[in-house]
Structures are given as structure tokens and as C-alpha cells.
Image (cartoon, rainbow, N blue to C red):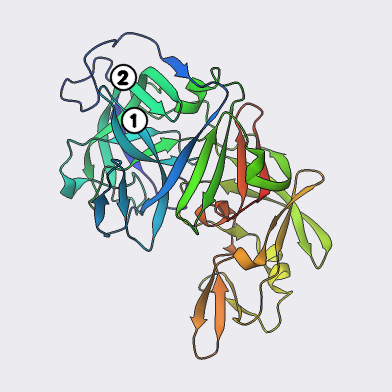
Amino acid sequence: MFLPFLYLVCILLLQILPILASPFWNGKDDILAPRTSGDSSGFSVHAILGPASNSSAKTIRRGDGIWFAADTDYEWNIPIQAGTPPQTILVQPDTGTPDFSLMSTLIPVSSRGVAPGYGDGSIFFTGVVFRDTITVGGLTVHNYEFEVCETSKSQVGGAPYSTFGLKIDPAGMPTQPHRIPSFFPTVMAWLDDPVFAVDFHKSTSRGVFGFGHVDRKKYVGEISYTPVMADNGGEWVVSISGIVVGGTFIKGSFNVIIDTGNRYGFEIPRWALDRYFGQIPDTSSNSYWTTYTFPCDYPLPDLVLGVGDTGSVRIPGFIIETFKEDEKANLCRTNLHEGGGWGKHIVELLFVGFDYGNKRVGLAQKSSY
């Protein structure tokens, strides 16, 4: 995950022969290369809501073996199976990190972190690298090397949530003494189409993470692609070509980082923010939230952004979440702020296709929210 001034320190020592105490290793096949099997034509994995890393909400166990939490702040997670025999674990699909990092179930509940690295720098994890079987939806990778955090210093406790890194970083995971490949580059050659796509639905607390295909039924109109910027440190950085205001396209390119692990992130530059809220009467700038307040009774206009050379993507105004800022004055605000980060709050409002093979991102209007 990329967040300004928030860093994860995860010290991992590469261990070719895993410790037998690992909850994931079966003691076999420790010298074999990764081997992939399953559905190469593409498959989908259901996404669910889990507690945010700074959450103190109570976690509960469901019959399907998935951890949930009732929480006002949350993160999207998908279930995977790890180890032999397989254990079901929730992982956060995070395009802002290369790490495939699992929280060991050997850590006492009181010491577990629910999501590695989302804190003020006081959170850190140490561990080792293990090799075992990982299954994600219809795809299984045998002898895959991944990080297991075995000790942690964390602000919170809870279920053993983990990170499923999908950063477009060829360097792989930052393990020692050498780096190991991230998950998606490992399985790219197996998939017919090396892509993954995100379709989150906050209204139902459910979503879909599709691998190896882009589901045409998940969006309306055309999907518009824009290339990933070069020399970006492995981030999914793309350029937005402008904004539409009152039916007129205003050209003005700006870069955004698309990070599905960012719990916030619904940001555009100041000039675009000014133009968008300039369509609403009686707005006022709110320096604390780096956004605008506006009369709650006034409907928000659609947010239309330019994508690529000729494409665009529309976010209907009615789906943009508003909050009561001043009850007495009947003033509201939104999650749309000044900046360049695109995280959970905007990814929930778009259909997003990550084309790893062609190094580009596709954006489209969702067919449902």
C-alpha cells in the first residue's frame, strides 16, 4: 500500500528450507520450481468487507471459514487457500505493494495485525519466506514462495488478515538476501490473458476480483485504457487527460496512483476540484478536508474524467457519498479531495481493469453499484 508518510517495515529473511513449525508447510517439495494448474481462461473470486487495520471492531467466525467484522472503517478482502492441507485466509488485494504476505496463525490473537503496514511507522513485522501451495479461485500454484510474518508489533488485534500484492513491480517482494517474484508475474504465463479486474459494490458489501479476463457484463459503454507511466517505482500510475464540466471537456493532464490497498483515496488536483464544485451554487472551500462544502439539498453533478487520447469515464453524481458537515447550516461534503491518490473510495465507483501484460489500466462506468 502507498500512503504518504505511512510505511511498512517488514523484515523478511529468505529461508529455502522452511521451519517445520510453519502452519503452512507440509515438509515436501522444497526444491521444486513453482508449478501452476487450474483455469487458464480466467476466473472470479468474491470480495468481502473486513475490518480496517486501525479497527478495534469485534471479529466473528462464519460457517464458511471466512472472517468478518462489523466496522465503520473497512478494507476489501478476498479468500485464498494456503498450505497443505489448505487453510482459508482473507487477503487484501493491494495494487500498492508487491508483497504476498500472510500473517501466521501461530501469532497470539492479541498480537496479530489485521493488515500489514497501515499505520504510523510503529507497526512492523518480521518473518521468513516459505514455499507451499497457494490457491486463488480457480488457480493453484504449487511450490510458491511467499512471506509469512511470524512476529509483529501492532496497534490492534484480530483475525490473521494478510496482503495479496498486485503492484506492477518486476523487482518482486523486498525479501532478504534476495527478492522473490510477486504472485501475478508468477502466474502470468499460465493465464490466457494476463489481466485482473476489480468490481466492488459497497451497497451490498460484496464484490468480484476477476483474474485472466475482463467481464463485459460488469460495465456499461466502452472501457477506456490509459498506459501506466514509465519510471514510476512499480506503481500503477496513469494519466487522466482532463475533466468534463457542463458538457465541455477541459484538457489538463494529471497523474494518479491507483492503489486498491488505500482505504481512502478519491482525489483530483485543485484546479479540477474547483471546476467540479464550481457547478454547484453556494459552495465554500474547506481547507481542513481539502475539499468543498455545499448545500445538502443540491444534487451532485456527474464526475466525468478523460481517459487516454479520446476516452472518458463517468461517475454518476448520485453514487458519490456525502456527509453532513454542518447540521444547522445544512452543509455537506464528499470524499472527493485534492490530491493524486485513487484508493478504495473511487475504486468502488468504477470498473477497473489492470492489464499487466500490456502495462495499462482500463476504466469504465459500472453496470451496478
Identity, as a three-letter code, of the amino acid under mark 2? Arg
Secondary structure at numbered mark 2 = strand
Which residue is under mark 2? Answer: 131
Disc nearest the viewer among 1 and 2: 1
In the figure, 329 relative to 321: above or below? below
- The residue at 31%/8% (across/down) is 31
Quadrant location, the N terminus: top left
The residue type indicated by label 1 comes to Gln
Kindly indicate whether the residue at mark 2 contacts the one at mark 1 (C-beta within 8 angstroms). Answer: no
The answer to whether residue 171 is left or right of residue 15 is: right
The one of 10 and 69 positioned closer to us in this rendering: 69
Q: Is residue 165 left or right of residue 122?
A: right
Q: Helix or strand or loop: what does disc 1 sit on?
A: strand
Q: Which residue is mark 1?
A: 81
Tell me, for residue 160, which label it has, or none.
Answer: none
| Position of 107 relative to 187 (above/below) | below
Q: How many marks?
A: 2
Quadrant containing the C terminus in the rendered view: bottom right
Q: Residue at x 36, y 54 (%)?
A: 52
Q: Nearer the viewer, residue 296 or 97?
A: 296
